[in-house]
Amino acid sequence: MYKYLLWDIDGTVLSFLASEAYAVRTLFKKYKLGECSNEMLKLYSQINTKYWQKLERNELTKPEILVGRFREFFEIMEIDAALAESFNKDYQITLGDYIEFVDNAKETLLSQKGKFVLAAVTNGTKLAQEKRICLSGLDKIFDEIFISENVGAEKPDREFFNFVFQKLGITNKNEVLIIGDSLTSDMQGGFLAGIDTCWYNPRHSPNILEIPVTYEIDDLGELEKIIYA
């Protein structure tokens, strides 16, 4: 029986793509860069994912990926890349201004509150995540919130999970389940940390990395069958 549920935030509880689209489009207007089309957003999102994966592999630092993603995007779109640093600063603030829950996420979390120790585990930036977590009311649902910048390590690093285990007083890893949408940070991190994993995979993406996954679901409502088994 699980006692501790570790929840990823972006793409698992809150729709990061919705917040991302809002922030980028809002800042395009602020910086008078014209309209940001769906195709442009898709390109930026792909670049963003690539840079965060570099962070997970310790190839770049967080400051490097935050500015680098916009610099590359702007260069491709023939926008002045010198705007990347200030654009990113505004982006961190604006990202938290729009909240959209993933289907069944809030209801599932509320049904678990008081029955499990609920902990948020996120690689997002401190500025953006604290604002989004507060605005969404997740700060009143989760028992503990672990943001990588506060922890001093990023998922999937074992140091991140060791910090979480220590703070929560976890001694039996069989009592822990991590729920997340990312193979490279959530599932890989859980596997390396020696805990069970639940891959939230609504798009039925293939596990091309062949990372061992304990459970796979496409609807968060399916969690009940797992955690009460």
Image (cartoon, grey):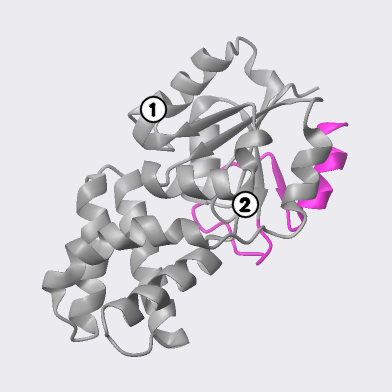
**Which residue lies at the image location 76% right of the left edge and 51% below the top edge?**
220
Question: In the image, what residue type sits under mark 2?
Answer: Thr
**Occupied quadrant, residue 66:** bottom left
Q: Nearer the viewer, residue 148 or 174?
A: 148
Q: Is residue 204 magenta?
A: yes
Q: Nearer the viewer, residue 191 or 179?
A: 179
Q: Secondary structure at mark 1?
A: helix
Q: Which mark is residue 12?
A: 2
The stretch in magenta equals 201-229
Which residue has dot 1 on it? 151
> Residue 223 vs residue 36: left or right?
right
Q: Quadrant of the C terminus?
A: top right
Q: How many marks?
A: 2
Residue placed furthest toward the left: 82
Residue 163: x and y in percent read: 44, 20
Residue 211: x and y in percent read: 54, 45
Above or below: residue 11 compared with residue 213:
below
Specify whether residue 59 is in view. no
**Which residue lies at the image location 70% right of the left edge and 20% below the top edge?**
175
**Occupied quadrant, residue 197:** top right
